[in-house]
Image (cartoon, rainbow, N blue to C red):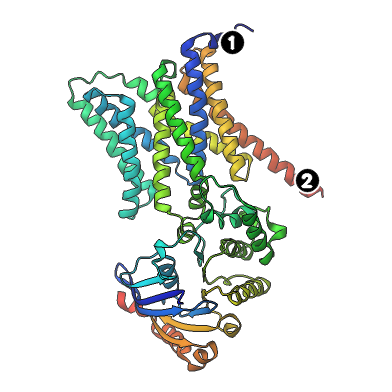
Amino acid sequence: MKCVEVTDLVVRYEHVTALDGVSLDLAPGTALGIVGPNGSGKSTLLKAIAGLVRPTSGSVRVLETSPRALPPGTIGYVPQAEEVDYGFPVNVRDVVSMGRYPRLAPLAPFRAQDRRAVDDAIAALDLGALQKRRISELSGGQQRRTFVARAIAQQPKLLLLDEPTTGVDAATEDAILALVRSLVKGGLPVMMTTHDLDRAHEWFDRLIVVDRRILDDGAPADVLASGTYAQIREHTHVHGHRRAEEHA
Amino acid sequence: MNELLAPFAFEFMQRAFVAALVVGGLCSTMGTYVVLRKLAFIGDGLAHASFAGIVIAYLRGFNLNLGAAIVTVITALGIGFVHRRARISLDTSIGVLFTGAFALGIFLMSRSPRSTVDLQSFLFGNILGVSRADLETIVGLAVIVAAIVAVLWRPLLYASFDAIVAQASGIRVAIVDDVLLVVVALTIIVSLQSVGIVLVAALLVTPAAAAAQLTSRFLPMLTLAGIFGIVSSVGGLYLSYFLAAASGATIVLLATVIFFASVGVAAARRRMREAQRVAS
């Protein structure tokens, strides 16, 4: 069974084409890495799969249905930059507990299984000592761990991580890596964008290079050896991004 | 002692106290969401929008509260619609729609030969004039609002804190947002007779803002805001009797006093924590 099936996906934001004919699928228990230069459409691809962006054309199917028609709690999503009010009156445990909200019926009490899922997520991200701290009192890396823990507590059927290790320390990166690998081993499909290629073989079973289209797709070692990513990074560095050319 | 209980001897005052209790609790509870979403402007906006409904109902000869409720709910839904479709900020959408609705009310009044409606009671409220039927409407609407919030408090909280991730996880954020706007609109309608168009925003925002000074958790903030709202409205009404002052204004002034007291307490607590930190 394919957990994700993207067919000829085109996403345009007014005059900018973010994705132009992307097709891919994802099997259960696979960690898919998505690399590409800034502005290449990596985040847009995750947003389209999460149902946050409507395709201009083409289709996105998650677990054989439209993302917007999925039962609540199916997709766990950690965006690149959380657009939250850090002054909001919630502590770490409150935020992680929100991961259970989509799964709770109206007026339903927080059940033992919900508490266990929250406890497990907090333990997996080593947040036990911080769980009563307000999120405004945390470092950037601790906030990242909190948001990843919320997605894990949700017990999703598909996990989408948008650069979850950007700005975090080595210990946090190791914790997230160990968690992702253990979830993938348990059969969860994971899609994750990153700029860090040094550990790609540790993170991912499969790697795609995106620059509005999928330029390469395969095992991490093969994709890195092909030099595709290095070439588009060089092109972007020397000539600027193609989107900039579109605007010119 | 008898003198202190004097306000409760009158039936109209008993009704007013019940109305104050309900309005104070309801406004401040909804105000918690309004403050957390940084939508303080919406209370003022929807209250002014209700004016068009009051004028239309007056000119057409039907129930003024019903007219206010219809126009305010339509404006609330319109605010959400314009915000999403025109891709403008919610604040801008509120500014455009409420001024439009308010202007419609003034326009219709100015064109009508029957422009003798007692504006002052709508602008500043008249809680002492709450009839038994009014009280039943207030309590009925309050029960509806309370039931909606009890059912939706988790999606409301999630969507208020992190709308994008809430949506990705399957919460229908646009619907939750619209429900919030409608519930705030109903809360304002419930409160209009008590504190009036001009002051209702204060009862919505000030108790919640005071609670935010004293706690860093959502549910305690909701509870404290409710207590402050009830103390302000019931206490304000009680004080207004002895001070022979306008009840709506006294209610809002007491809420303002509680807000500044909370700011003072919060500042003192911060200084004490700092002193303890330096000492250790």
Q: Which residue is mark 2?
A: B276
- The secondary element bearing badge 2 is classed as helix
Q: Looking at the image, which residue sits at the far top? A: B2
User: Horizontal and vertical percent for residue A96?
Assistant: 60, 57
- Answer yes or no: is residue A34 visible: yes
Amino acid type, mark 1: Leu
Res B130 seen here: no
Residue B192 lies left or right of residue B217; in this view the side is left
Nearer the observer, A3 or A191: A3
- Mark 1 and mark 2: Cα distance apart in space: 45 Å
x then y, percent, for residue B142: 46, 31
User: Circle 1 sits in a helix, a strand or a loop, which is it?
Assistant: loop
* Number of other residues with Cα within 10 Å of mark 1, as a class: few under 14, some 14 to 19, many 20 or more: few
**Where is residue B105, by image quadrant?**
top left
Q: Dividing the image into 4 quarters, which one contains the C terminus of chain A?
A: bottom left
Q: Residue at x 53, y 72 (%)?
A: A163
**Is A15 positioned to the left or the right of B208 in the image?**
left
Name the one closer to the observer, B189 or A243: B189
Mark 1 and mark 2 lie on one chain; the one further toward the N terminus is: 1
